[in-house]
Image: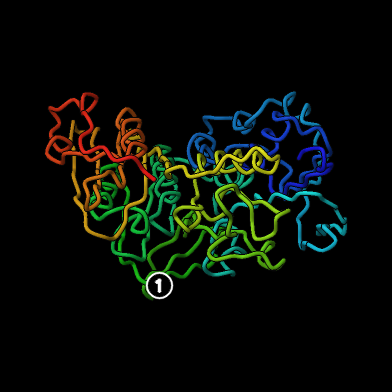
Amino acid sequence: MTNSISRILIIGAGQAGAWAAHTLRQNGFDGELALVSNEESVFYERPPLSKQVLAGQMDAAATQLFSTEAIEAMNIEWHKPDTAVAIDRTRKEVRLASGKLLSYDKLMLTTGSRARVPVKAWAEIDGVHTVRTIADAARLGAKLLPGRRLAIIGGGWIGLEVAATARKQGLDVVVFELGERLCARSVAPQVSDFLYQLHSDQGVDVRLSCGAIDLAGAADGAVRVSAAGAVAGLFDAVVVGAGAEIASELGREAGLDTTSGLVVDACGKTSDADIYAAGDVAIHPELGYCIQSWANAQNQAISAALSLLGQDRPYADVPWLWSDQYQCNIQILGAAGSGEGTDIRRVCGDNQQSFIRLDAEDRLESLIAVNDPKLIKLGKRWIKAGMKLPAEILADPAQNLMTLKPYGLIARR
């Protein structure tokens, strides 16, 4: 199949785009490989941006996925910084904001997602920040000085990571969350309670059900934050952590099938046989929605790139992501459903506990482990095996789960 493909175009140079390009070259594609990036910096990891990079503990160069020599060896035709604005599927061309027209035999969309700013006017206020790029982290990092005040709009994962980083830098931090609990879209109430206590214990002022937020520029670069119609205070900087917008408009406007993102099959193929997609922008083929995680971006891109070369490798990975906050490494495996099931809390110490969700048939549905990476590894095996699990053993911290034997083992179809 690769003999009939002379030119591949990738749009997006984040985690998914990087691994797509790497996989293509490592698996025999020696034709033209072009890549469009709307940033000058390419092929870098985003997770450290809200933590080590923001705190000044990691140089931006250390986030690079591959060495400079390895990237040069990929022999990529770069178009950066530039933006793809339209796809002509009939002519198999992509038009860039610069006016360039790029042809392709196969096209891969790894356009990812972008920070959501609920009110467009907020983006024009000097003291308002998002954390999505290296440039974002550098700009905000310069503001994180001891004694300053930082407001965070949104109590999701990115907001809480920034809160932890800023608090460790000696800032006064206030988190404004519109909902009744933290990270409500991704975790159960008991996990939200854990996160609330974690941040409260560190001195973060977490304000739940805060009411409608309004931001306005003030003197000396400060930002005035109002909540529920009342002024909440002046802050040296504000971070908007109000979720992400999936960057699917390029594919949608080209007529590709979309829902919350680009619809792909298990091999990453869109509704156009010559266009593939992977990472944040692509629907998880089994779950039916987009997954925003480092592991998903990498592994779905590898699967799609191999499939593009005719080496089909269906992608069906269980969602896995993590967050580092203060002394806690929080890893999340699976996706909790809304049906019947059993919720288990396993407490092995002050800084080590887990929240386990079994479905109605006692199979692992989701697992959130705090400072327990070994349990996450076990969880991956349990899910892969489709094994039933005894709730009473999972809940008992005296039990060594490494010795847990499967019973009622049923192979997944």
Residue at point 20%, 33% (across, down): 350
| Residue at the spot of label 1 | 212
Q: Position of residue 3 (x, y in %)?
A: 82, 38
Quadrant location of residue 129?
bottom right
Of residues 180 and 294, the one drawn nearer to the viewer in this rendering = 294
Count the marks: 1
Q: Secondary structure at mark 1?
A: loop
Residue at point 23%, 32% (across, down): 406
For label 1, count other residues whose C-alpha is less than 10 Å away and answer few (under 14), some (14-19) or many (20+).
few
From this viewpoint, is residue 237 visible?
Answer: no
Q: Is residue 143 above or below residue 223?
A: above
Residue at point 50%, 36% (across, down): 55
Quadrant location of residue 45?
top right
143 horizontally vs 99: left or right: left
The N terminus - image quarter: top right
Q: Position of residue 324 (x, y in %)?
A: 40, 37
How is the structure coloured here?
rainbow
168 horizontally vs 276: left or right: left
From this viewpoint, is residue 7 visible?
Answer: yes
Of residues 220 and 322, the one drawn nearer to the viewer in this rendering = 322
141 horizontally vs 90: left or right: left
Residue at point 54%, 70% (across, down): 119
Q: Is residue 24 above or below residue 155?
A: above
Farthest residue to the bottom: give it.
229
Q: Amino acid at mark 1?
A: Ala
Q: Position of residue 382 (x, y in %)?
A: 31, 36
Q: Position of residue 399 (x, y in %)?
A: 14, 27
Farthest residue to the right: give it.
100
Q: Is residue 18 above or below residue 187?
A: above
Of residues 372 and 351, the one drawn nearer to the viewer in this rendering = 372
